[in-house]
Image (spheres, rainbow, N blue to C red):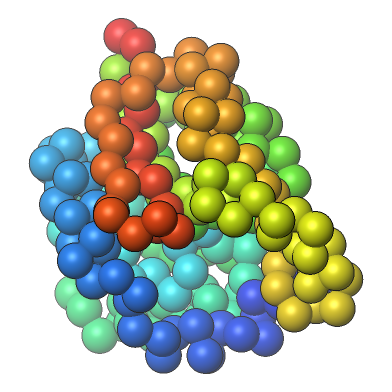
């Protein structure tokens, strides 16, 4: 955990300056998510980075809580929020597993570009499931590296050891969907850009 925080703190300024790799795909993910959001919703986004997505979605819901384990990322996100009139959006430096959230209290949770960076994605998915109200939604965008770069599992440990990249879990889209359905979710929508290396965007619903 300490290394992960240090890694993301170190790259936060550079991360904030980077343009979106695939703007069209990002816009499509935003549009899909917005089609589900409603003014009365209570929403959590974990691993929010520098807050760009949170700032776009927060005006559409009642309350939007965005968290990230990196204080530097949150510092940048707060600076962005200060330039808006949003009073329903909060940023917080905390990892998912340390969040104190009442069971069945949220309408939607977002976990973008994060499940492949967790030590235990199944535990995270179960935690999200418990947070959601019946009928609640989990939006995720995940690099399923086993589907397009299986050899990466051979070099990922070295890159992480040298602190050049964060720890990365190698799994397929099928394995990810199996994790979601095993937790109790149903997969409601899938979107994957044409690029072979693109992340898969999933909308999963907790049954009513």
Quarter of the picture containing the N terminus is bottom right
Task: Report if residue 110 is visible in the image.
Answer: no
Image location of residue 97, percent across then percent down? 67, 43
| Residue 181 screen position, x and y as percent | 49, 17
Q: Is residue 184 left or right of residue 4?
A: left
Q: Residue 38's image quarter?
A: top left
Expressed as whole percent of the image width and height from the top left, the position of residue 154 reads: 80, 58
| Residue under the point 26% across and 31% down | 189
Residue in the image at 26% along x and 62% along y: 26
**Which residue appears at 72% of the width and 39% of the height?**
120
Q: Quadrant of the C terminus?
A: top left
- Could you say where residue 148 lies in the image, as x and y percent from the top left? 53, 52
Hey, which residue is sitting farthest top in the picture? 208
Asked if residue 110 is positioned above or below residue 89 in the image, the reply reads above
> Is residue 69 shown above or below 125?
below
Q: Residue at x 45, y 58 (%)?
A: 197
- Left of 111 or right of it: where is 24? left
Tell whether 164 sits left or right of 150: right
Q: Is residue 118 above or below residue 166?
A: above
Query: In this figure, what is the number of numbered marks?
Result: 0
Foreground residue among 159 and 18: 159
Can residue 204 be seen in this snapshot?
A: yes
The one of 162 and 6 positioned closer to us in this rendering: 162
Q: Is residue 131 above or below residue 163?
A: above
| Left or right: 94 as drawn, with respect to 34 | right
């Amino acid at each position: 955990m300490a290394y992960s925080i240090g890694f993301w703190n170190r790259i936060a300024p550079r991360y904030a300056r980077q343009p979106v790799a695939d703007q069209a795909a990002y816009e499509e993910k935003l549009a899909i998510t917005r089609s589900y959001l409603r003014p009365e919703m209570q929403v959590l986004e974990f691993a929010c980075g520098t807050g760009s997505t949170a700032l776009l979605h927060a005006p559409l819901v009642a309350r939007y809580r965005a968290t990230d384990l990196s204080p530097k990322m949150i510092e940048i996100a707060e600076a962005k929020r200060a330039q808006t009139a949003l009073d329903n959006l909060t940023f917080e430096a905390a990892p998912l597993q340390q969040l104190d959230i009442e069971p069945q209290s949220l309408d939607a949770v977002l976990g973008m570009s994060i499940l492949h960076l967790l030590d235990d994605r199944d535990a995270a998915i179960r935690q999200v499931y418990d947070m959601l109200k019946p009928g609640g939604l989990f939006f995720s965008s995940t690099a399923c590296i086993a589907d397009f770069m299986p050899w990466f599992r051979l070099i990922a440990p070295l890159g992480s050891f040298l602190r050049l990249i964060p720890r990365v879990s190698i799994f397929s889209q099928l394995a990810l969907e199996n994790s979601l359905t095993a937790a109790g979710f149903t997969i409601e929508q899938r979107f994957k850009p044409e690029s072979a290396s693109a992340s898969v965007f999933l909308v999963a619903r907790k049954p009513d």
